[in-house]
Amino acid sequence: MNPLRANELVIDIPDRDDGQPLDFTVEPGQTWGVLGPNGAGKTTLLHTLAGLRAPRHGSVCLGEHSLTELRRRRISQQLGLVFQERQDGFPATVLETALIGRHPWLSPWQMESGDDERFARQALDQLDVGHLSDRLVSTLSGGERQRVAIATVLTQAPDTWLLDEPTNHLDLHHQVSVLQLLTEQARSGRSVFMCLHDLNLAARWCDHLLLLYPNGDACWGPAERMLVPAALERLYGQKLITVEADGAPVFVPVKS
Amino acid sequence: MSRPLIKPLLVLALTSLVAMVLSIGTGSVSVAPGQVLAVILGEGSNLQQTLVLELRLPRTLAAFATGGLLAVAGALMQVLLRNPLADPYVLGLSGGAAVGALLAMLAGLGGLIVSGSAFAGAMLATLMVFGLAHGTGSWTPSRLLLTGVVVAAGWGAVITLMLAISPAQRLPGMLYWLMGDVSYARSPWPALGLLFLVCLLVVPLGRSLNVLARGPMQAAALGVAVRPLEWTIYVLASLLTATAVTMAGSIGFVGLVVPHMLRLVLGNDQRLILPACALAGGTLLVLADTLARVVIAPEQLPVGVITALLGVPTFLYLLYRSR
């Protein structure tokens, strides 16, 4: 697979200084978490890495090639993106929604085959929404929709997963099963790069972290080096207590 | 997936054939359905030959082509603007065409020049809206829609102005054109050819359109080249609408109601909806035109009146039900 690489990347956030250019590679097998307060640019970073937004400086590469040299179709065969916000537009069923994940793999004249449908159904089952396949997406709860969106990218089967708050709207059990699924994806040689709000989920499931500060500063590296209480307190502007549970640090905000 | 696409299309194709035979057979002199087919195959008396082949068949085909073009254009506009209320005229195209046609009529010109002038007006309106919506940044569906609505209002004012200053004897012709009427149609073949070509073209574009209906970001993330696709839809829909308007004036509601009715019944796969729109839109207009010819025979109603009279309650009903 072609690793996703940010080269001296400065994301374009209006009225913000360039800050620290981002320079990292998401290698196969790695799970990255992006942490930062509201408005730090996590979503913008994700969209820039997916080639949906132009960076202010620098470039994003898949393997040897810059995203700007690749056709959208080629990119979408390697990069899958779970959005934070979705628009419904026209009514569609859960199965139809998951099936559009096959779009990058089908030629214009091709119809979805039985295999594609099986693939989509499997993905829906894995996300525990298989029983909803004939329901209209607009009738689902927020958490169910979130899982359908993840199932759509699972159907797309990209080498690199980009996810914007994948645990949004999910109950505790489904948060864990989604992160478990992503860990398995990474273990099978793919890579995962996700924005997370929950510091503790990130500490628990990510092996690499990128801290994004509102002023454009950033630091990144292996998770154990990034989980420094002082750095995290500065990141969120919030005092934290650190305890250990089940072999991972747990950060609890101090009541003021 | 491909089998369920074919059955509804076959049903619709059969329905449109029946509607066409019915339409050709109906009029001041009735021709039985069997006779209609026989005459088309080269039999029957001279009178029947003239009646069917020279008078009624071209008109029926023109009605079919117009209805099909409008319905497909409407469905495309709805995907482009991601707005279920969009129709082929929402961006002011019919206003431009009307101003073009009325100008030619006002100058006392007729026939081909009126058509050509309407087509030029439609294209001018399209370019204008697109250019204005572009502004300094990139356009968004809501910006395009707003620009279109405002420009359409402008055309409306110009049309009223032209009607106000026109000499009385030209008014009936102008009003007929504005209401939409198939009897102006010339040869239906170019329009039918265009309709067929577009139906072929939307098969490979169809799945991309399905993805685009989920929003441009999602579509781009799934490998759709969004901007070029949106341009293609815009140009195609404009071309279809301009052709329809040039042929039969601005016939309302076909482009709005037909895609909606089909979406309610057949779901939202554009690969099915677009060809189905061509067939169902054509059928609807053929039937409406037949009604328009017989309701107050020997006088004729403009077909736009019939489609609007059918379309308004149907649409209100659908809207009421969807809440």
Image (cartoon, rainbow, N blue to C red):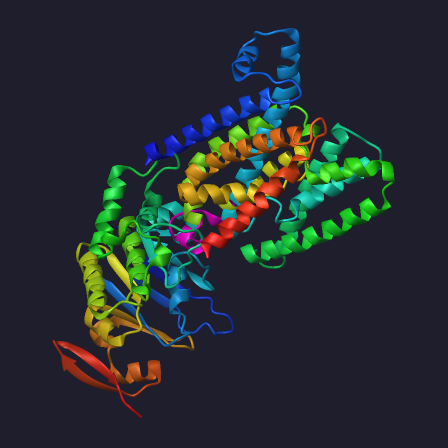
A9 with respect to A185 (left or right):
right
Residue B242: quarter of image: top right
- Examine the rendered structure and indicate whether residue A189 appears above or below residue A197: above
**Residue located at (51% from left, 73% from top):** A15
Q: From what the image shows, is residue A214 above or below residue B26?
A: below
Of A204 and B244, which appears nearest the observer? B244
Q: Which residues are magenta?
A: B213-228
| Left or right: A130 as drawn, with respect to B252 | left
Give the quadrant of the N terminus of chain B: top left
Inspect this view and state whether residue B104 appears.
Answer: no
Residue B240, placed above or below residue B210: above
Q: Position of residue A214 (x, y in %)?
A: 41, 77
Is residue A106 shown to the viewer in this render?
yes
User: What residue do we see at 72% from left, 29% from top?
Assistant: B299
Q: Residue furthest front?
A: B296
Q: Residue placed farthest to the bottom in the image?
A: A256
